[in-house]
Amino acid sequence: MSHAHDQARFATAILDPEVPPPAGLAAPDGRPAGKRFDVYRNNVIVSLSEALKAGFPVICRLVGDEFFQAMAGIYVRAHLPKSPIMSQFGGEFPGFLAEFEPVAQLPYLPDIARLELALRQSYHAADAPPLAPETLQALPPETLLSARFAFAPAMRLLRSEWPVHAIWQANAQGGPAGSAGQQDGTGKPSGPEDVLICRPGFDPEPRLLPAGGAAFITAALAGNPLEAALDKATQEAGAFDLAATLGLLLAGGCLTRIIIKETQ
Amino acid sequence: MLDITKHPAPGLPDSPGVGYKPQHYADIMADPGPVGWLEIHAENYMGDGGRPLAQLHHLAERFPISVHGVGLSIGGEGPLDKAHLARLRHLCDWLKPASFSEHLAWSTHESAYLNDLIALPYTRATLTRVSDHISEVQDVLGRQMLLENPSSYLAFAESTMSETDFLAEVVQRTGCGLLLDVNNVFVSATNLATGPQDYIDAFPLEHVGEFHLGGHDEDHDDTGAPLLIDSHGCETADPVWALLDYTLARSGPRPTLIEWDNNVPEWPVLAAEAARAASRLARVAA
């Protein structure tokens, strides 16, 4: 038996139950490996499926445990982790869901998966002391308009065509399993939603952004001063509420520094 | 080879430790009971911040910490993942743990991580590869590491050395220490129809810096022969405690860890397992 590619054969047989275990592996009395090799197959697929489920609990709730397990088996074989850091596993899951035919009738799943990924990234992001709200309140309006902001590493922004915040909330904790939010014309959210993920302490929280909020944050994240970000937000939503958006950012610990332009 | 006079042996106390789970944080800080030290899986603490690192920082102020890697793939055919090794170094430099350990196993093939510890045949070729990888780890981390014996489910026809001879030779070549997982010894001996006490008799116990205990599941292979699976999902089995006693009588007390990674119980259950280990350690310390 060649030594050079033993582990390649081993890995192939672990991932594909149709491939027989590599030669040279045996039970102690010399019988073929049989079920003993299945221990590895089981450990790999089950542990990675469990890791995927731990990372996407709301997706699991939306599709049901049995369906999720079957789908996870397909995903993990096609997208093995590139790193042993399991908290990073599943980065390709939103794209997988977008292409996975059996969930085509749940078109919001990829964005829910993006939201769950963002929450996980936020949880592990670097700490940064938040800007005190008084710092902003103390500034004269002209200074504030020309100021730029630095944002917390734990902040994430998600824009979706779907009511992802409502769906996430209805399924994250305690809500009835499988609820896809209210899309029945009763006045409950049914359209696009923008979500701010902030981490005021150690626990990330998704917050629904008011109209124009995401445009404002996107522009400010790109390094634009407040006035230019405000323009972008008002172009998108005439009734943009700057105070409400700044309030969300401050309460969520999303702003870490204010960069004030030197006066000439 | 690492000059161990410049890198003192790991400093875990000869008391029970437990594999740390975040849900036990408040219990451990309030009353650790018989637990004298904690072990963490390195890969769970490779983020940039947040609660995991903050909790670890507080724990490290109170307890000696053992960093246990599960993803380095020391037995892999390919080169070690340099980026991962750098992350381990970063964690060890920050935490200054009392011990660092990894497994005699492989888990990564061509950058695909399989999330399991897979055994390898024991040959001159694998001995050289494993020894080279361990020397590289010790050079990068600037410290001695402990190497853990795996659980086996199958025999490799290719093997030309026993596992104990293989481990003894790795120690000779690299100056590393050993982590003896007593549950793995029992699991492998049952699965390979060998004697667990014979394994302990042949093991270079003078190089052991830590013992592991943990639960296993019982199954059967295609012919009905017992097949034990290293699951870390329940209490340590009675024959494994007996094997620990057999080992302790020969080695004297060493840092002894309770591993419980799946179906993690409430803190009192884990503390009771640690108390069981404490009474056995006390018996041989007297």
Image (spheres, coloured by chain):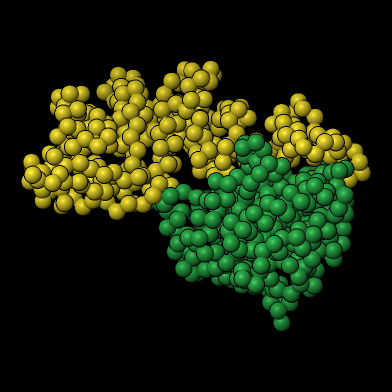
Q: Residue at x 18, y 50 (%)?
A: A133
Q: The chain drawn yellow is chain what? A: A
Q: Residue at x 83, y 58 (%)?
A: B165
B77 or B116: nearer the eye?
Answer: B77
Q: Nearer the viewer, residue B68 or B213?
A: B68
Q: How many marks?
A: 0
Does A181 appear above or below A41?
Answer: above
Q: Going by the image, does B193 lie left or right of A255?
A: right
A146 versus B50 height, above or below:
above
> What x and y, as percent, mark residue B208?
72, 66
Q: Quadrant of residue B223?
A: top right
Q: Colour of chain B?
A: green
Judging depth in this view, the residue of B173 and B111 nearest the camera is B173
Q: Please give the name of the residue rendered at 17% of the width and 23% of the height, measured from the top-left corner.
A: A235
Residue B230, compared with residue B204, is above or below; it is above
Residue B181: x %, y % from top left: 72, 59
**Residue B180: % across, % down:** 73, 61
Residue at image location 18% in from the left, 37% down from the top? A225
Instruction: State the image coordinates of residue B204 (x, y, percent, origin top left).
Output: 79, 66
Residue A46 visible to an observer of this rendering: no
**Residue A4 appears in view:** yes
Residue farthest bottom in this picture: B286
Q: Is residue A235 left or right of residue A114?
A: left
Judged left or right of residue B75, residue A94 is left
Query: In the drawing, does residue B242 fall left or right of residue A207?
Result: right
- Image quarter hosting the N terminus of chain A: top right
Task: For the C terminus of chain A, give its image quadrant.
Answer: top left
